[in-house]
């Protein structure tokens, strides 16, 4: 029996560094990154299947009707969603799937796939979060304040997650997430059956959900 993979959902407030962490995590591990679908037009340099799957509105709504999204939302006239069939297919093949997504999307995924592993990325402090957003150099004073207020509200959702990882450094955050994944694979409720060698008195194989 082939063990199933895990769906690892990583999110957190803007500026917490979840994108950088996910990039490093994928570089160091054989994980499969779930790529979102959207109806917006590709931007310069974006690649089909790498940045997004670009669909027409008709194609997207057809997939909604077929229940082929773990979650989706319409933002500023365009749909964004997480394809269900591709992610579940990878999981059934034993591949661990990483999904980097905003908090509202993560909570919708939790409703659809509650057996996922939900990890909330926190900044070392709110002051550090503010510095990171400012250092992007893309915010006006007004949008900076909006993002900062939003971050305060988003942190209140941390109780909805299984784990919290403070992003002091990317390297340490990645190590913590790797440890979480190892621990999740060992959870009793993920074990389907154990074969006990009665002579040796040891478990020589574990088959996972």
Image (cartoon, helix red, strand yellow):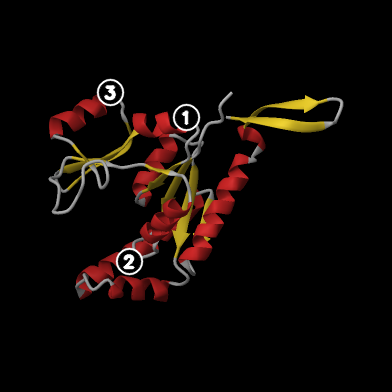
What residue is rendered at 22% in x and 68% in y?
A: 143
State which quarter of the image contains the N terminus.
top right
- Which residue in the protein does label 2 denote? 149
Query: Few, some or many C-alpha atoms within 10 Å of disc 1 (few <14, some 14-19, many ≥20)?
Result: few
Q: Tag 3, which secondary structure?
A: loop
Q: Earlier in the sequence, mark 3 or mark 2?
A: 3
In the image, which disc is placed on residue 66?
3
The C terminus - image quarter: top right
Question: Which of the two residues, 76 or 153, is positioned nearer the viewer here?
Answer: 76
Q: Is residue 200 left or right of residue 190?
A: right
* Distance from the alpha carbon under mark 3 to that under mark 2: 37 Å
In this rendering, which labeled residue sits more in front, label 1 or label 3? 1
- For the question of whether residue 166 can be seen, the reply is no
Label 1 belongs to which residue?
Answer: 93
In front: 154, or 121? 121
User: Percent position (x, y) of residue 9?
Assistant: 44, 46
Which residue is rendered at x = 85% and y = 30% of the image? 200
Mark before the other along the chain sequence, 1 or 2: 1
């Amino acid at each position: 029996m082939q063990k199933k993979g895990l769906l690892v959902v990583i999110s957190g407030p803007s500026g917490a560094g979840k994108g950088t962490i996910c990039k490093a995590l994928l570089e160091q591990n054989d994980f499969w990154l779930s790529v979102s679908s959207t109806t917006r037009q590709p931007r310069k340099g974006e690649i089909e299947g790498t940045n997004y799957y670009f669909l027409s509105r008709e194609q997207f709504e057809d997939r909604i009707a077929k229940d082929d999204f773990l979650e989706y939302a319409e933002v500023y006239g365009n749909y964004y969603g997480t394809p269900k069939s591709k992610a579940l297919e990878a999981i059934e093949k034993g591949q661990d799937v990483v999904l980097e997504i905003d908090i509202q999307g993560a909570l919708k995924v939790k409703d659809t796939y509650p057996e996922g592993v939900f990890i909330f990325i926190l900044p070392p402090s709110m002051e550090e979060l503010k510095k990171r957003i400012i250092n992007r150099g893309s915010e006006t004073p007004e949008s900076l304040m909006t993002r900062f207020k939003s971050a305060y509200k988003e942190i209140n959702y941390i109780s909805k997650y299984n784990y919290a990882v403070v992003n002091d450094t990317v390297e340490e955050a990645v190590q913590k997430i790797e440890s979480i994944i190892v621990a999740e694979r060992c959870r009793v409720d993920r074990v389907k059956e154990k074969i006990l060698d009665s002579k040796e008195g040891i478990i020589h194989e574990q088959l996972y959900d």
